[in-house]
Amino acid sequence: MTFLTETEPPRGIAIPVLDGIRRIVARNRGPMTYHGTNTYLIDAPGGVAVLDPGPLDEEHALEVRDAAGAPITHILITHAHHDHIGNAAALQALTGAPVYAYPKNAVGIVPDVPLHNGDEIIGMTCLHTPGHAPDHLCFLRPDGIVFSGDHVMSWRSTVVSPPHGSMAAYMNSIRLLLDRGGVLYLPGHGPPLPDPMKAVRKLYTRRSEREREVVAALAQTPRSVADMADELYGNISEALRPAAERNLTAHLIKLAQDGLAIEDDGLWRSA
């Protein structure tokens, strides 16, 4: 699929996205985070909801509080990776707002208010979309706007990293998003994603193709994940190679669960 780019965003200020939605980009630029985590400010009854307060950064927390322009009433979390939830405690200390998130995550963080699949919060429907993380939530508005977190992004494909990431769960969650529809995705990193259903279908097709490529590779000879990365990803940069190997490992674990692959002393082969 074709990925989008954007110029380096300004820091410390709220950038208008749509009517009632702004974003502040955190200062955690990197190969896995693009320009940084998008912290969204969403107009809500009685104030403003903050979605994904970003990594631990007191300056960013102060900027989010000041940019809100109204009381912060909710702190919503898409998933408990540090670049999304790390600043939640700092922002809560500044505002007193409760933290809303899926109740079971890999790092043991307990939200003030648990959210489950199908729950409604500030007019949005919570969609439990595990795969990238077991606790991942997307938030669907009635107008078709989806806050997609790291499940579907515009600037690159999502890393699925075992043991907490699951390719089987990820593919199921992609099908859930296809069933629910949407007109615009607002991801956890990078610019808005227009025509998201086209992008999600391409994403599902590409992941399915990758699985078939892995099956074909295993049919030739037993090999390591590193060997398969060399074959399937070509001249990938060293910065992105660990992510490629984690994705391959997730595919292999799914194939093992499906009875199609076996791992023995670091080498994978067809079952």
Image (cartoon, rainbow, N blue to C red):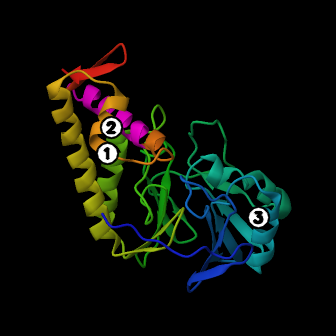
Assign a secondary structure to mark 1.
Answer: loop
Q: Residue furthest front?
A: 235
Please tell me which residue lies in front, 144 or 156.
Answer: 156
Compute the Cα span from label 2 to label 1. Answer: 5 Å
Assign a secondary structure to mark 2.
Answer: helix
Q: Is the residue marked by circle 3 packed among few (<14), some (14-19), or many (20+) residues within 10 Å?
A: many
User: Is residue 155 in sight in this rendering?
Assistant: yes
The residue where tag 2 is placed is 230
The answer to whether marks 2 and 1 mark residues whose Cβ atoms lie closer than 8 Å is yes
Say which label, 2 or 3, has the lower sequence index: 3
Q: Position of residue 1 (x, y in %)?
A: 30, 63
Residue positioned 37% across, 33% down in the render: 249
| For discs 1 and 3, the disc positioned in front in the rendered view | 1
The residue where tag 3 is placed is 60
Tell me the kind of residue under disc 3.
Answer: His
Q: Position of residue 115 (x, y in %)?
A: 55, 52
Q: Position of residue 219 (x, y in %)?
A: 15, 27
- Is 256 magenta? The answer is yes
- Is 179 magenta? The answer is no
Q: Is the residue marked by circle 1 packed among few (<14), some (14-19), or many (20+) residues within 10 Å?
A: few
Residue positioned 35% across, 29% down in the render: 225
Tell me the kind of residue under disc 1.
Answer: Gly
Please tell me which residue lies in front, 205 or 268.
Answer: 268
Residue positioned 33% across, 64% down in the render: 180
Magenta segment boundaries in residue numbering: 244-259
The residue where tag 1 is placed is 234
What predominant SS class does the magenta segment belong to? helix
